Amino acid sequence: MVVGNESTTFQQFTLAPGLDLHVAPTPKFKRTRVSLFVHDRLDPDRVALGALLPYVQKRGTRSHPTGKALERAAGELYDAQLSGGVYKFGDRQTIAYSLDIVSDRYVDEPVFQKGIQLLREMVLEPARENGGFVAAYVDQEKRFQIGRVKALVNDKIRYANFRCIEEMFKGQPFAQYELGTEEAIQQATPSKLWEHHQELLATRPIDIYVVGDVDPHKVRDEIAEAFVTSRGDVLALEPTEVSLGEGPERTVIQEEPMNQGWLVLGLRTDIRRSDPLRYGLQFFNGILGGFVHSKLFINVREKASLAYSAFSSYNANKGVILAYAGIDVNKYEQALEIIKKQIEDTRAGRFSDEEFEATLKGFETQYRMRLDTPDGRIYHHLGGQLEGCPESIDESLAKVSQVTRDDVVEAAQHVRLDMVYFLKGVSDR
Amino acid sequence: MLNPTIKSYPSLGQEVEQARLDNGLKVVLLKKPGFEKKYITFSTHYGGMDSVFIRPGETEPTTMPDGIAHFLEHKLFEEPDGTNVLDLYSKMGASPNAYTGQYYTVYLCSLVEEFRPAMDLLLDYVQRPYFTDENVAKEQGIIEQEIQMGLDNPQRAAYYNLIEGLFHRHPARIRVIGSVESIRQITKEMLYLCYDTFYHPSNMVVTVAGDVSFNEVLDIVTADMSQRSYTKRGPIVRPIPEEPDHVLEAVVENRMKVSRPYLLVGFKGRLDRRAGESSREYHRRLIAAELALHSVLGKSTQTYWDLYERGVIASRYGYHLSVFDGAAYFYVAAESEDADAFAGEITQALIDARDKGIDPELFEESRKREIGQLLTAFDDPDWLVNLYVTHLFQDLDIFERRELLDEVTVDEGQEFLKAFVRENQRTISRVVPV
């Protein structure tokens, strides 16, 4: 299928068991992106090790054994960006590695091939000693990772988001912070981390994406040569657990020394990403708080002047919606009442045709704009791929265009307010 | 007279078409073949630093409360009939936004379809101010929350302290957003006066990035402008106070709830265009300064990795150069486990490069990195337009950058370090845990 003049689908190649390559050739970018994702369970015993891994891998490789040597090599390739990080998608931990490099056409060198080699070394051939990772790198990165975990509190909105989720899913894997706990990080050793690395690469599903001005078959051969290693039995990952939860909503108020307060309402649903109602739910979120025409922005910010930020976000892989407002702490009751009313109004179908149409157009625009960035294309596909329901942007466009008002109301019957979390600023001065 | 011109930059893979209307408005198309998105902006050469100005035809300076340019940006979204521009855009599936910097305010809109109505609306609402006592009071509530949100952010707080420590009186020390106290002084009369001064087409530029034709763009803009009557204007004068060479405060500290210190080490100096210097020559000196900083502070340096391995750089590492008429500064930032070591060793690395020279290999690598970065920017219409507009308002041509990157020399980089890296030109701004 085609939007504009260009295919929106990835060409797929299975390179080895559970190792899939997705290629989107396009002449419109001046850079090429290669992203490699390793998927694992969101297991409390594994999260900290998996999250630490890419940080240690960035410290050096077989032929560029120090962080400086690796950076120098990337710099010589016209600022090639080698990155590594970790995401929590539903009940999955996804470790992401990527290379972003200028297209050979704009420089007088075959930089792409060299870039692939750097990425391959970072992922498959990190610097080693005594059968494990380099001890000094592991020790330093453990310390920095613990620092990052502690620094979460510095970023108020991310912290409020994390705390709300933690309270909502207490005792479940999804409650964990994506980097793991201080205690778990502390227990990592060079050899444990090496075993983890080997196990992930041999037994976990891997997706590789390439977006850029490339020849798909040539790039398939290049990627296969660089990244296919011996694979064992590939673990089949269970679908993410998605459920309504039960009982009356709970309220958690936490005080921190800060000027503002962050009010976060956590909504749970039993609608999976693969559920046909998922798009109705996406509209529910869009009408509630996804746009500047949405109820939260209009009623909390524009009409009541209570907040600069007032919005909601939908986590499709976990079926969760969070509504946020950054407010004056004295306006807690008023803001809570207004936000709850917006949720009820949306649920009851009290939204105008204009609100509905604007939401539809908003999603159509968002999807089409994803075609303009490599990340937009890759993450659109990856989100569904993780739950066994990948979609091209065309397919998603077709689905949003079929959503009706009734779908929104029907999806809304599967929404339950689970948590009212308030990060309350108190003066410390 | 339109005199549209087309220029092609094959080494950047970019075509640019531009024209200037009779009323002085500049119109630019940055062609992006194959892109779904159209990114339209309407920008004025007016920002947070312009608190004091002499209106065309006047002789005495006018002084306005800090934060008024940003306040005005918020207020333009309101329409006389009580509707809001945001709603109108939503109906088109378009996302509007705006941002205010030190010397620019940019109104923007991203869309896929309905290019013409979206562009008509942008031109129209930016040229239709509507301020009342009530809507000004309402905005004060919203912006107060925006200010509070910023003050809770350690990076922002440290940055404010830095610019206020570096400068005695140059407007580079002004917070674009203002303070709770300053924005409370803003009235609708002040807004109208600033609007009248800075929102004249001769002080503005319309840019489009996307897969559209320049004829269509010009057609939309000229149709809009033909309905409006602007009289010719002289230039706006922005008086620049004489700024001492030394900083106001060497160290500024703030206590906040953070897990470890965050700090900025800043150096001030002058990087003004010299009398008789061409824009291109000046631009080359600016690029030399950037490459010098990359060569001394970038992630390919031994300094960076020494500090990293010891936790002296723990995260949020970065550096940035800002250049204005009459004042410039750069800062190096990090979250650190040892704030004193960070400030000391970063300063020492800069002094070593100043005195012993910049490593030529690293300078060459920095040159390559900047070429790569520039090409990256051309894949991102938002970033590209921002670069274009900020360069234009400083009388620089972003499209010269690729060539200048080949020309610039390591000696020019060192000259920059000699002018900036001095003890009494340094301010350290720290946010430390309570």
Image (spheres, coloured by chain):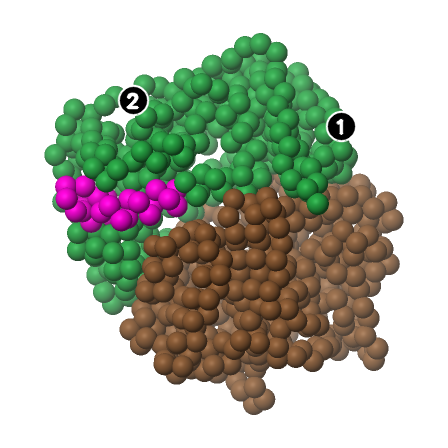
In the image, what residue occupies the spot 25% across and 67% down? Answer: A108
Report which colour depicts chain B: brown
Above/below status of A399 relative to A347 = below
Query: Which is more toward the observer, A364 or B294?
Result: B294
* Residue B161 image-quadrant placement: bottom right
**Percent from the top left, x then y, of residue B310?**
36, 55
Which residue bears the numbered disc 1? A334
| Amino acid at pointer 1 | Gln
Report which colour depicts chain A: green
Which quadrant would the C terminus of chain A be assigned to in this image?
top right
* Residue B236 image-quadrant placement: bottom right
Circle 2 residues within 10 Å: few <14, some 14–19, many ≥20? some
Above/below status of B387 relative to A37 = below
Query: Which is more toward the observer, A274 or A24?
Result: A274
> Which residue range is magenta in the image?
A121-145
Which quadrant would the N terminus of chain A be assigned to in this image?
top left
Which residue bears the numbered disc 2? A237
Q: Mark 1 falls within which chain?
A: A
Whichever of callouts 1 and 2 sits on the residue coming sooner in the sequence is 2
Residue A397 horizontal side relative to residue A21, left or right: right
**Percent from the top left, x then y, of residue A208?**
27, 39
| Amino acid at pointer 2 | Leu
A124 part of magenta stretch: yes
Above/below status of A386 relative to B162 = above
Residue B234 horizontal side relative to residue B90, left or right: right
